[in-house]
């Protein structure tokens, strides 16, 4: 911490916004006092444990430095401080580059976020409990097609080029009532995006370098559990062979998603997007895609996207997924534990899957190339163990598959792709 940095204390129990906030005895009472301040490198914002900030939110547009990050965390003893956004913290999202990879995807609209990091960098958010429910919004109901997108934590890059040093750690995020239909808005538990700059020639390409999401428990959120990070520059990543130089200019680098537990996400669980060599390890997903069904997903309009899987990459190069566990992903058009989707060089190794209703792993379509699935264990995955869905190649090697009697090894109507089986063991249950 630099000598000029400050620590701000916030307590809903004993604070007052007329205080200076610089000691625990003179703490602020609300998060609004923080939103009104310009944070400097090395500053800490500490929320008192046991505090509840109802109808409040944090919106941070300031940045730290690599040697002096801004830290938002907790102090005192007891339960983690809780931010209950209740549909507040509204901001406007616009990718600025329609259409997205599908013309049916929504690319702009209002979003409510309990914590918003907008064009910030070198910032750590840790040790908080976060909710964003919508049960008190008059006229809105859960499956409404045009309901507002909501996020626990939203991270946005736009007008300051590459954003470095984003760390989200030990967060408890739950009951986020987002929009189950909008796949690529900042929507769900944790969602990071890159939006088109006002003047890219001056500010540079908006993207991320050095992002860590670790130790977070995310449950009962819609649509996504954890996603890093969709980009306005998606058109640069067309085709099957993905050039590393494209990622260095337009994509994300040094992405780590580790030691997280995602349970009961309405749609997908954990996804790295447009990233070069992302590392996704030691994560757990449980009961993913629990809203991708006719009962809840019932007003999509012309939006496609009634598909979801548990832990997977989108348009990444050399993504590594290891030591993850996925159980009870619910059946939909996908519904599998793992999905090597439209990327180059994805490796799944030392992962475990159990009773996922859409199977163990899919290799998804023509742009899923150079994928390897090795040393994994699948136990009683349902529907069909593998889905080689028109992919040109895949190596499936040294895995152990425990298959229930009557369940096909290749899922029906999810074939047509090419794969090589080497030294796998298959046991009938």
Image (spheres, rainbow, N blue to C red):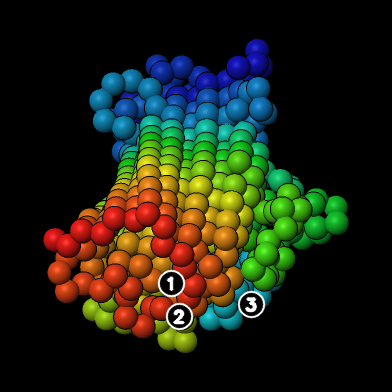
Up/down of 173 relative to 175, above or below: above
Q: Position of residue 113 (x, y in %)?
A: 46, 53
Q: Residue at x 49, y 31 (%)?
A: 72
Task: Mark 2 or mark 1: name the one nearer the start of the chain.
Answer: 1
> How far separated are the C-alphas under marks 1 and 3?
28 Å
Compare residues 418 and 382 and report the one nearer the observer. 418
Using the image, tell me which numbered label, if any, was put on residue 416: 2
Using the image, tell me which numbered label, if any, was put on residue 424: none
Using the image, tell me which numbered label, if any, was put on residue 99: 3
Q: Report helix, strand or loop for mark 2.
A: loop
Q: Report helix, strand or loop for mark 1.
A: strand
The residue to which callout 1 is attached is 388
Q: Report helix, strand or loop for mark 3.
A: loop
Compare residues 142 and 343 and report the one nearer the observer. 343
Compare residues 123 and 323 and report the one nearer the observer. 323
Give yes or no for contact between labels 2 and 1 (Cβ–Cβ under 8 Å).
Answer: yes
């Amino acid at each position: 911490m630099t000598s000029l940095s400050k620590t701000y204390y916030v307590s809903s129990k004993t604070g007052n916004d007329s205080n200076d906030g610089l000691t625990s005895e003179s703490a602020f009472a609300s998060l609004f006092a923080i939103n009104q301040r310009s944070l400097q490198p090395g500053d800490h914002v500490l929320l008192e444990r046991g505090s509840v900030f109802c109808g409040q939110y944090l919106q941070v547009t300031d940045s730290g430095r690599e040697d002096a990050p801004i830290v938002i965390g907790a102090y005192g003893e007891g339960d983690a401080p809780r931010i209950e956004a209740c549909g507040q913290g509204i901001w406007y999202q616009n990718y600025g580059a329609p259409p997205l990879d599908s013309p049916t995807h929504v690319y702009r609209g209002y979003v409510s976020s309990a914590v918003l990091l907008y064009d910030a960098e070198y910032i750590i958010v840790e040790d908080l409990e976060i909710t964003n429910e919508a049960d008190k919004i008059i006229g809105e109901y859960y499956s409404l097609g045009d309901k507002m997108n909501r996020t626990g934590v939203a991270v946005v890059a736009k007008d300051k080029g590459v954003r470095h040093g984003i760390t989200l750690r030990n967060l408890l995020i739950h009951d986020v009532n987002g929009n189950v239909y909008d796949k690529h808005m900042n929507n769900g538990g944790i969602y990071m995006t890159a939006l088109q700059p006002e003047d890219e020639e001056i500010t540079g390409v908006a993207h991320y370098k050095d992002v860590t999401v670790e130790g977070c428990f995310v449950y009962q959120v819609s649509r996504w559990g954890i996603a890093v990070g969709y980009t306005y520059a998606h058109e640069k990543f067309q085709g099957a062979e993905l050039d590393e130089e494209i990622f260095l200019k337009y994509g994300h680098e040094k992405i780590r998603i580790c030691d997280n537990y995602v349970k009961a996400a309405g749609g997908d669980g954990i996804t790295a997007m447009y990233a070069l060599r992302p590392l996704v390890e030691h994560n757990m997903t449980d009961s993913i895609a629990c809203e991708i069904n006719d009962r809840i997903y019932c007003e999509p309009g012309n939006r496609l996207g009634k598909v979801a899987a548990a832990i997977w990459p989108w348009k990444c190069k050399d993504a590594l997924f290891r030591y993850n566990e996925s159980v009870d992903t619910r059946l939909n058009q996908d519904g599998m534990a793992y999905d090597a989707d439209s990327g180059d060089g994805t490796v799944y190794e030392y992962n475990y899957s159990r009773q996922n209703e859409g199977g163990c792993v899919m290799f998804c379509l023509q742009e899923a190339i150079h994928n390897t699935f090795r040393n994994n264990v699948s136990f009683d995955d349902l529907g069909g163990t593998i889905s080689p869905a028109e992919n040109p190649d895949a190596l499936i090697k040294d895995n152990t598959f425990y298959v229930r009697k009557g369940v096909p090894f290749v899922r029906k109507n999810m074939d047509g792709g090419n794969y090589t089986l080497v030294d796998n063991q298959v046991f009938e249950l």
